[in-house]
Image: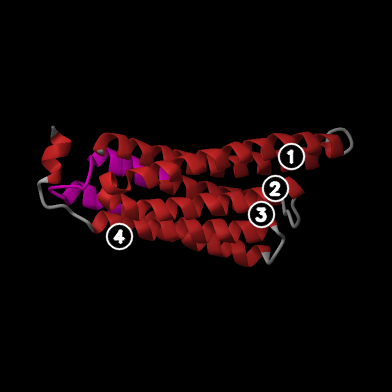
């Protein structure tokens, strides 16, 4: 009943602009992390990710303020909060990964770590495509569902790379160089969590579709 009533009232559409701005930081940070994993100018790309994360935090704060101040929101306030927080968790995880890379002074990365880079970029771009479509959920429900399903499939690919990468890492370093194994396992785990966070965003989008169509 409330969903139907909300459709009849004027909306605060600034939320969609803020979602798109945040999505741009996700894409930028994912692209920078992909380049970092390729071993290209690690310092520069680390700084880029840090800058994107700072901007994302600012946008998240703007969204939370708008949620409190807006009389009518385009969909449930709790859904808006959960969506922007899941997006922010994704970029926070990217920055955490970069901090680990710096902590252990890593300059090169395992092949399967590098393969996870393009997966993160694809997830970010899919999310970036989907967020503007939320402004007309019913009209775009089919495409939004496709996007969410595509992110889930990418997360499954990431899971396989994570597991196979750990296995290869153990065979290479497990007995001869335990510290290298531990460092590699930590980075693999954090990269996998980045993709997990993108899946969380996709799940939030799916929930909004279900509740508003």
Q: Which of the two labelled residues, at mark 4 and mark 1, occupies the earlier sequence position?
A: 4
**Crowd tier of the residue under label 1, counting other residues whose Cα lies within 10 Å: few below 14, some 14–19, many 20 or above:** some
Q: Which of the two labelled residues, at mark 4 and mark 3, occupies the earlier sequence position?
A: 4
Task: Decide whether residue 131 is among the magenta residues.
Answer: no
Relative to 128, is 152 above or below?
above
Q: Which of the two labelled residues, at mark 2 and mark 4, occupies the earlier sequence position?
A: 4
**Separation of marks 3 and 2 at Cα, in angstroms:** 16 Å
Which segment is the magenta one? 63-86
Which element carries disc 2, helix, strand or loop?
A: helix
Quarter of the image with the C terminus is top left
Foreground: disc 1 or disc 3: 1
Q: Which of the two labelled residues, at mark 1 and mark 3, occupies the earlier sequence position?
A: 3
Q: Which residue is mark 2?
A: 113
Instruction: Please state if 6 lies on the left or on the right of 194 as rendered.
Output: left
Residue 35: x, y in percent?
64, 61
Foreground: disc 3 or disc 2: 2
Q: Which residue is mark 1?
A: 165
**Crowd tier of the residue under label 2, counting other residues whose Cα lies within 10 Å: few below 14, some 14–19, many 20 or above:** many
- Find residue 174 and name its label: none
- Residue at the (64%, 48%) spot, across then down: 116
**Farthest residue toward the right?**
176
**Separation of marks 2 and 4 at Cα, in angstroms:** 33 Å
Whether tag 2 and tag 1 are in contact, CB under 8 A, the answer is: yes
Foreground: disc 4 or disc 3: 4
Relative to 157, is 95 above or below?
below
Which element carries disc 4, helix, strand or loop?
A: helix
Q: Which residue is mark 4?
A: 17
**Separation of marks 4 and 1 at Cα, in angstroms:** 38 Å
Whether tag 2 and tag 4 are in contact, CB under 8 A, the answer is: no
């Amino acid at each position: 009943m409330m969903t139907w009533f909300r459709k009849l009232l004027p909306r605060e559409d600034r939320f969609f602009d803020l979602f798109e701005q945040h999505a741009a930081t996700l894409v930028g940070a994912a692209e920078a992390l992909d380049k970092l994993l390729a071993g290209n100018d690690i310092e520069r790309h680390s700084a880029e990710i840090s800058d994107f994360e700072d901007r994302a935090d600012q946008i998240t704060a703007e969204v939370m303020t708008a949620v409190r101040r807006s009389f009518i929101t385009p969909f449930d306030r709790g859904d808006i909060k959960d969506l922007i927080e899941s997006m922010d968790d994704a970029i926070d995880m990217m920055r955490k990964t970069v901090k680990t890379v710096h902590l252990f002074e890593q300059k090169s990365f395992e092949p399967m770590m590098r393969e996870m880079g393009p997966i993160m970029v694809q997830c970010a771009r899919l999310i970036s495509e989907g967020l503007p479509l939320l402004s007309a959920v019913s009209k775009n429900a089919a495409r939004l569902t496709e996007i969410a399903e595509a992110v889930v499939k990418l997360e499954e690919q990431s899971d396989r790379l994570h597991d196979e990468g750990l296995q290869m890492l153990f065979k290479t370093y497990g007995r001869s160089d335990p510290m290298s194994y531990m460092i590699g396992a930590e980075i693999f785990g954090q990269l996998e969590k980045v993709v997990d966070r993108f899946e969380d965003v996709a799940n939030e989008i799916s929930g909004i579709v279900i509740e508003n169509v």
